[in-house]
Amino acid sequence: MATCFQKAIEHAFKLFTRKIALPVPIPTEDLLELGSLFNQITKEELNLSPDILHERVPGPKDPPVTYMKIIDNNVMTVSVFILRKGSRLPLHDHPGMYGFLKVIHGSVTIDTYSPLDQSHFNMPVASLQNLHQRFGRKIPAFPTRFENTRTFSAKDDCAILTPEGRNIHEIYAESGTAAFLDILAPPYCTERFSQDGFRPCTYYKEVEASFTSAERATVSNLHRQRLVQISKIVTNNQQTLHLGHTVM
Ligand SMILES: [Fe+2]
């Protein structure tokens, strides 16, 4: 009999294959239906070794994050991330991608942002100068809407991101070892997949910036107080874990 994981993956493969053939947004109800399948997946089903989830203070040679690839093709990537207490995947984006993050052990906290249409915003000159001074070079900054900070455990539904919404996030394990299943479609761009567009993973940090009243007027009342600018950061190769995920 097919397991919850098998059912969810088969469903995801069909949905995302259709999406590649039909370049229109995936309807919310389809995403929620797929999410309901991912919600049923447990760590027991994935047969993770208890040893790898064991709670311990990482030694100097222990990686703060362990990554296990389960599926990697031109439709989607499915992997498991294990974060030791205190480790994090820094603020990063998923350009043009859909994502499902299902915690299967422990808990992770996620800071989530949504990208905003840059054509409506101008980075104030003073803020750009300030960034230039702080980082010693010109750094572009991008308007985003901070959505929320939320902690997910294995009892919670998966977190879902889309190309337009909740697409940028930072993930950290505060209370102990945590593991989550990560489903991304289409995958981050690699040379193999580059024919359908370049999708690099970019890292960011939140920077201070003010918005004009005209800029604030472009977003709803609800979100006006949550406007933030994020700026690209440079990572070195040693930090890169896999397909753009970086450990800090
Ligand atoms: Fe991510």
Image (spheres, grey):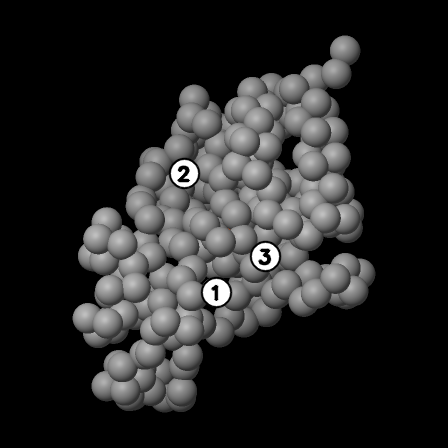
For image coordinates 36% across by 62% down, the residue present is: 144
The residues bearing labels 1 and 2 have C-alpha atoms spaced at a distance of 19 Å
Residue 39 at x, y = what percent? 53, 25
**Left or right position of 243 against 22:** left
Quadrant occupied by the C terminus? bottom left
Q: For residue 169, which numbered disc appears in the image?
A: none
Residue 227 at x, y = what percent? 28, 61
Q: Earlier in the sequence, mark 2 or mark 3?
A: 3
Which residue matches tag 2? 108
Residue 13 at x, y = what percent? 73, 36
Q: Regarding mark 3 in the picture, which secondary structure is present there? A: loop
Q: Nearer the viewer, residue 51 or 15?
A: 15
**Left or right position of 52 against 175:** right
The residues bearing labels 2 and 3 have C-alpha atoms spaced at a distance of 24 Å
Q: Regarding mark 1 in the picture, which secondary structure is present there? A: strand
Q: Earlier in the sequence, mark 1 or mark 2?
A: 2
**Left or right position of 39 against 86:** right
Q: Earlier in the sequence, mark 1 or mark 3?
A: 3
CB under 8 Å between discs 1 and 3: no
For image coordinates 59% across by 24% down, the residue present is: 37
Q: Nearer the viewer, residue 199 or 122?
A: 122
Is 40 placed above or below 93 here?
Answer: above
Which residue matches tag 1? 203
Q: Mark 2 or mark 3, which is nearer to you?
A: 3
Is 137 placed above or below 101 here?
Answer: below
Quadrant occupied by the N terminus? top right
**Left or right position of 150 against 181:** left
Q: Is residue 69 visible?
A: no
